[in-house]
């Protein structure tokens, strides 16, 4: 499979160099909305592409392997036609070969690659959002730590716009396998109040000179110098790691259906230009 | 940010001791230790009662921290501070910082906004922060963690509007304005709870309404009158004073015969209903882009032997105006720039006496002030005890051109434009105007490339902080204008300074380029405490 390498090796160096400015997923590409094509494309991708691009398109290992296709600046920048062309024709000067597949199969592969870069609010999601809201507020206890439109707790990220900023797969992983989640801005600590009660809290920012901490009640604590010792590291993150056991498959799917509705704006018709210029002051 | 009464926090200094809700009373008292509105206080005076930093110890003023924004342009934000937390903005984003250290507490980035624009700041009310996206959504955020309560598109999906201003919180409403090139603008009041619109006042009347006769045959939905800066508020009279900008097309008035109400005006609006109590138009039928969006400062004082509630404004057109803000009566106007050739004066009713042949023309005509203005949206500041209004002033002329072309909204056509005069460079000053007479008490020249867009803040300790045209923050003696201290920030300045205190220590903050600078007295001396 080595020689198969890789759609989108094209411009792979610039692609890597741009990873840091990829930004949140933004795509209204029609391919990403075609659930059947995405599903068929995923199966074909596993057969043909994972050897170089890695499982789930996260990138191959070692020299000469294919780049990450998930949350990829290059993929988002490319049109559907471009993506299909790279698969059909290969990319000159790279290890990416041409795949002589029927057009529908090319299209399915492109749809799957596109879906790896599509936010949750532009892809079809099975499940009942109303039932998912109940899971969010009650059975799952999600709102103990997460807010949606001002309703909820302080220990986790606000989810009011989460479907516009995360892919469906990321949401699923955050629920079922949160161990790998970035903790920047959410490092768990404990603070003690005047009655000796321990409050759960998170560190929003930390340096050698100050800690900015929010407790579970929304209290903000700006700790400077010796005061920083008041924040004691917690044993584990506040996000439960057992939702896979506590929630049924249907619960999780319904929760995903609910979360995938949480965006402040309708999906944009086109990707937001990354180089949009500031307007004049007037 | 509730009072959580943590054991150790109570006995330590330097800890944000959290937070009663920001209500009407706090907004009326502002500023004190906090800085709760873009305009500093409802009156727009921007005069701080803080006195730790004085003319005697200002030599000990040092930078405390600098926070960089990944911004596309020069920051125009004037941050708010409440209980040790600073809220600052750039295009489509808000950050909350520990005001002592500059470290980030939270960051909100609006997603999916297909436009960038400058942003001047936020409003605060209750437990919420409010700010406008470049495409005119008002967003309500939890001030502890930046979580979104709601996002309301107050332009109704009309992408021809853009927003750069800081909203104003008044009682239970958030007041907003916007700008366009070829669309009639408006002031709107939105519920602070839900974002629903309580009232809206157009800067140009509808057909048949009073004032509509001042437009000839021009389409009344194209008139402009942008409301893009923050107005002021008198709680006793319950009146908002909201300024409006120029009519469209900016430099060609041939299609819009008449005074073009209510452009280049200040509107006195009932804060509950939006009902217009009075208006005053500074420039009828403007063809020089002399927006009246400068802060309408409110000042109670004796004027010509009588106690009056005044509204004062140094206008972009070069005249300093004094009005009665209860009635709208015009009381006085005096030039505050020497380079002023478009009007020979202002008549008894407040109408300019226009000099012939100062309209823009196809061949160009030299007119003073320039489009940049004798002053502009940057902040003036008023020391009420000294009765001095400090105004960043530009002495400059330009060549104005116009062309007769069929106007098409949002096409970029503004009626043509203006060019600088290389042989006649402009010069910025900070001028202290006697607020009652308009006389220039002192002036401080600020040599530079005439590219600044920055204002001033005054303090009860006898200081005026201003940005200058060379990239410095400067502190002057407010009585004399003597230069006491400066710090070069290395950037073009597009923002006005503000001052606040946390745990008894006073700070001064200003945005410069893509950075936010905060200054305080050095820890090894200088503090009077």
Image: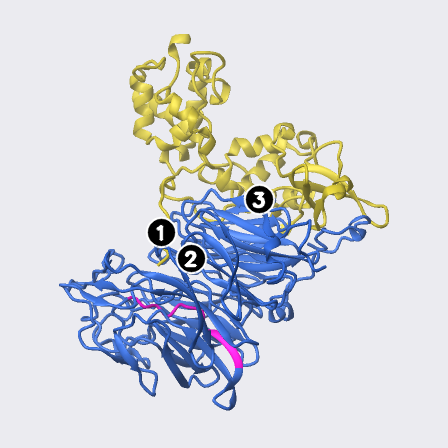
Chain colours: A yellow, B blue
State the separation of the CA atoms marked 2 and 1. Answer: 10 Å
**What residue does disc 3 label?**
A159
- Queried whether the magenta region covers residue A20, the answer comes back as no
**What residue does disc 2 label?**
B164
Position of B441 with respect to A230 (left or right) is left
Q: Look at the picture and state if B467 lies above or below B108.
A: below
Residue under mark 3: which chain is it in?
Answer: A
- Which percent across, then down, holds residue A247? 67, 34
- Which percent across, then down, holds residue B140? 54, 56
Residue under mark 1: which chain is it in?
Answer: A
**What residue does disc 1 label?**
A279
Residue most extreme to the right: A195
Q: Do the residues at pointers 3 and 2 share their chain?
A: no
Q: Are marks 2 and 1 in contact (CB under 8 Å)?
A: yes
Magenta range: B289-300
Mark earlier in primary sequence (3, 1):
3
- Of the two numbered discs 3 and 1 in the rendering, the one whose residue sits closer to the viewer: 1
- Queried whether the magenta region covers residue B290, the answer comes back as yes
Q: Are marks 3 and 1 in contact (CB under 8 Å)?
A: no
- Residue in the picture at 63% in, 64% down: B50
- Residue in the picture at 33% in, 57% down: B160
Q: Secondary structure at mark 3?
A: loop
Residue sitting nearer the eye, A251 or A4: A4
- Of the two numbered discs 3 and 2 in the rendering, the one whose residue sits closer to the viewer: 2
Quadrant the C terminus of chain B occupies: bottom right
Residue under mark 2: which chain is it in?
Answer: B
């Amino acid at each position: 499979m080595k020689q198969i390498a890789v759609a989108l090796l094209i411009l792979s160096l610039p692609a890597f160099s741009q990873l840091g400015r990829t930004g949140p997923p933004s795509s209204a590409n029609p391919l990403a909305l075609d659930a059947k094509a995405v599903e068929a494309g995923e199966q074909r991708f596993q057969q043909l592409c994972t050897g170089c691009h890695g499982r789930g398109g996260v990138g191959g290992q070692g020299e000469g392997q294919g780049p990450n296709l998930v949350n990829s600046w290059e993929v988002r920048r490319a049109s559907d036609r471009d993506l299909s062309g790279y698969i059909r024709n290969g990319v000159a000067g790279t290890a990416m070969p041409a795949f002589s597949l029927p057009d529908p199969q090319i299209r399915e592969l492109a749809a799957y690659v596109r879906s790896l870069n599509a936010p949750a609010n532009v892809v079809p999601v099975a499940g009942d959002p109303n039932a998912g809201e109940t899971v969010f507020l009650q059975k799952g206890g999600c709102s103990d730590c997460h807010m949606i439109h001002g309703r909820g707790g302080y220990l986790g990220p606000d989810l009011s716009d989460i479907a516009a900023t995360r892919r469906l797969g990321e949401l699923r992983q955050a629920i079922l396998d949160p161990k790998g989640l970035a903790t920047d801005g959410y490092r768990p600590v404990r603070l003690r109040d005047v009655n000796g009660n321990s409050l759960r809290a998170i560190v929003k920012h930390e340096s050698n000179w100050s800690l900015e901490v929010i407790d579970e009640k929304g209290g903000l604590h700006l700790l400077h110098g010796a005061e920083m010792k008041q924040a004691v590291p917690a044993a584990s993150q506040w996000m439960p790691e057992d939702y896979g056991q506590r929630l049924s498959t249907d619960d999780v799917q319904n929760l995903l259906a609910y979360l995938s509705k949480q965006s402040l704006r309708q999906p944009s018709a086109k990707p937001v230009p990354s180089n949009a210029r500031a307007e004049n002051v007037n | 940010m509730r009072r959580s009464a943590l054991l150790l926090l109570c006995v330590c200094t330097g800890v944000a001791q959290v937070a009663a809700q920001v209500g009407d009373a706090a907004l009326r008292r502002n500023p004190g230790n906090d800085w709760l509105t873009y305009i500093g206080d409802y009156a727009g005076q921007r005069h701080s009662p803080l006195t730790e930093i004085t003319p005697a110890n200002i030599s000990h003023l040092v930078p405390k921290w600098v926070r960089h924004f990944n911004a596309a342009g020069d920051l125009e934000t004037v941050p708010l501070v409440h209980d040790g937390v600073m809220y600052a903005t750039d295009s489509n984003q808000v950050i909350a910082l520990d005001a002592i250290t500059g470290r980030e507490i939270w960051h909100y980035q609006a997603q999916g906004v297909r436009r960038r624009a400058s942003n001047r700041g936020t409003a605060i009310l209750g437990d919420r922060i409010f700010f406008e996206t470049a495409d005119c959504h008002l967003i309500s955020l939890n001030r502890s963690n930046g979580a979104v309560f709601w996002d309301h598109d107050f332009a109704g999906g009309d992408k021809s509007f853009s927003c750069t201003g800081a909203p104003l919180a008044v009682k239970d409403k958030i007041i907003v304005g916007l700008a366009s090139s070829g669309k009639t603008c408006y002031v709107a009041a939105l519920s602070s709870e839900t974002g629903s619109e309580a009232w809206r006042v157009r800067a140009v009347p509808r057909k048949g309404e009073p004032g509509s006769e001042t437009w000839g045959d021009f389409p009344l939905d194209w008139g402009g009158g942008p409301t893009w800066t923050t107005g002021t508020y008198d709680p006793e009279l319950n009146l908002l004073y909201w300024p409006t900008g120029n009519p469209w097309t900016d430099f060609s008035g041939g299609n819009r015969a008449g005074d073009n109400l209510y452009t280049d005006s200040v509107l006195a609006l009932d804060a509950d209903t939006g009902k217009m109590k009075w208006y005053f138009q500074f420039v009828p039928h403007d063809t020089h882009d002399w927006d009246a969006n400068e802060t309408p400062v409110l000042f109670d004082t004796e004027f010509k032997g009588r106690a009056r509630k005044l509204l004062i404004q140094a206008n972009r057109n070069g005249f300093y105006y004094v009005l009665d803000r209860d009635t709208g009566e015009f009381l006085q106007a005096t030039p505050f720039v020497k380079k002023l050739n478009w009007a020979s004066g202002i008549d008894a009713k407040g109408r300019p006496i226009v000099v012939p042949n100062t309209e823009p023309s196809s061949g160009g005509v030299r007119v003073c002030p320039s489009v940049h203005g004798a002053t502009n949206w940057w902040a003036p500041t008023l020391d009420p005890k000294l009765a001095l209004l400090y105004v960043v002033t530009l002495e400059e002329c330009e060549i104005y051109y116009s062309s007769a072309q069929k106007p098409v909204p949002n096409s970029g056509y503004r009626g043509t434009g203006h060019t600088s005069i290389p042989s006649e460079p402009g010069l910025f000053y900070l001028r202290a105007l006697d607020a009652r007479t308009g006389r220039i008490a002192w002036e401080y020249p600020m040599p530079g490339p005439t590219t600044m867009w920055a204002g001033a803040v005054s303090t009860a300790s006898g200081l005026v902080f201003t940005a200058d045209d060379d990239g410095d923050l400067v502190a002057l003696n407010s009585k004399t204008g003597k230069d006491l201290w400066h710090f070069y920030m290395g950037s073009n300045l597009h923002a006005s300074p503000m001052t606040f205190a946390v745990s008894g220590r006073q700070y001064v903050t200003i945005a410069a380029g893509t950075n936010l600078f905060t200054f305080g007295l050095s820890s090894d001396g200088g503090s009077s405490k």
